Amino acid sequence: MTPTCFTPSRKYVSRSGVGDVVCSFGVTQGVEWKQSDEFSCSLTVYDDKTSLKSSYHFMYEKKRDRASILNDMIQEASHKFSKEYNIEDWGHIHLTSVETVPVIGRVCSEGIGRMNASSLLLEGSQELSSGQTIPLDVSSLEKFSLFPGQIIAGTGINRLGKKFVMTSLYEDIFPEYSPKPPDLVNCLDSLGVVIAAGPFATADTMSYEPLWDLMKYVKANMPHVVILVGPLVDTKNDLVEKGDLNETYDDIFKNLILEILKNIENLSTKVVLVPSTRDAHHNFVYPTPPYSVDHATKRLYLTSDPCLLNIEGVIFGITATDVLFHLGKEEISHPQQPDRLGRLCKHLLTQKNFYPLYPPSEELNIDFLHYEHHASLPVMPHILVVPSDLRYFIKDINGCCCINPERLTKHSSGGTFARIKINQIDSSLYKGSIKDYIQAQILKNLIHT
């Protein structure tokens, strides 16, 4: 699909380093990335009850409902910490005490602008601390990593009733792994997945060359699943921002879907489409409902942002929202610790939420009534996909393989995408993680084949 008014990006055409591997995970030497086309791959949502299947009315949220949901999140966390650390009674954050007491609450900032160590507040739940907030002193902690909205638990003392001095933090609790090991017999003992995140057209044109180059790679290598993470019609594209288009956003999207289906019509590959709040033709709300298409087909799988998918027993957690970038702008840590990107991924897993930042970024419009049901992480995913403008990576976080494939395009030049091969798991050795069976690479730009 190249309308006559769109000319190819010169910078994209003249890019260098096409096909270079810039990041690897596992033993990738000698790996055969090309899959056989004779397979049947099962793809479903992880939990049918909590998956978002259709669009909904938003901007009807009441402040009381939002407050109740935020309060419930603290209460739910308190039950998990109580069970993990055998805590019988939580302390009230505002009551004076001469001995250390266990407390739990949400980290807040009393100032405007970025949070710092001197502007910290701790907000308790209605049930445990009457919903009150108190200045939080973390100077006694050897190390900490905090952001607004984070739910923390620990012990401390409040001698005068004016400030809570935190003396220790409880270790964060990760979600439990899926007890059932993946079985890849249907995929001939290995599952091949390609992941790319939008934008799929360079910022100075709408000719979508990067997407069609990616589809050439898909045709040549026949992965079982291709995960395309939005935006597909990017609001930050120069032509969209200027309104310099001779087609509607919906028409551009429909033509893209037809072209994607045409590219996979002779393959057994399935395409997963994850929407984004940056999509000009779609609902600007988070959680984001699935795209709506006219041509329903078993080869095209439409899901929400965020989502948990079960692909042949492998649990994929996927979000299109740049939560790592939003968290990175607000997080404070002491002392300066290495592996900042890994730490940001760890926050998502331990907070058991795809978007734990509160208040959220101004770029995001959250509907908390749906956020409560559709943005949580009830299980530890085997693979967590978190596309971001931050640098690409593949990391092992407590047994979860976290991947940031970055963007398929960077303004007017080529970007990166990821390819993954998951080998058959020995069910007798399965303890939750499958990181030892994963081989993955991030490739620069795109491969012409």
Image (spheres, grey):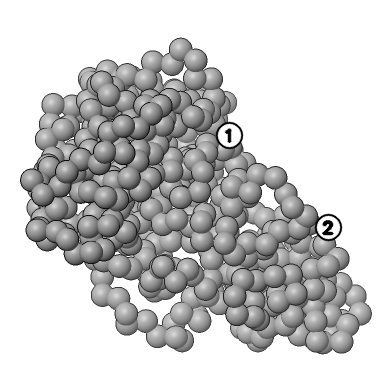
Which label is found at residue 403? none
Q: Furthest-right residue in view?
A: 98
Q: Nearer the viewer, residue 438 or 50?
A: 438
Q: Nearer the viewer, residue 66 or 205?
A: 205
Please, is residue 332 above or below residue 381 in the view?
below
Residue 339 drawn at (x, y percent): 65, 44
Amino acid under disc 1? Lys
Which residue is under mark 1?
431
What residue is drawn where x is 37% and y is 81%?
61
Q: Residues within 10 Å of mark 1 (few under 14, many from 20)?
A: few
Q: In terms of image quadrants, where is residue 48?
A: bottom left
Q: CA distance from mark 1 to mark 2?
A: 32 Å
Amino acid under disc 2? Glu
Residue 236 drawn at (x, y percent): 31, 59
Local secondary structure at mark 2: loop
Please, is residue 7 above or below residue 193 in the view?
below
Residue 230 drawn at (x, y percent): 31, 51
Question: Left or right: 395 with respect to 7?
Answer: right
Please, is residue 25 above or below residue 152 in the view?
above
Local secondary structure at mark 1: loop
Please, is residue 431 above or below residue 334 in the view?
above
Q: How many marks?
A: 2
Q: Of the residues under marks 1 and 2, which one precedes in the sequence?
A: 2
Q: Nearer the viewer, residue 404 or 187?
A: 404
Which label is found at residue 142? 2
What residue is drawn where x is 8% and y is 45%?
4
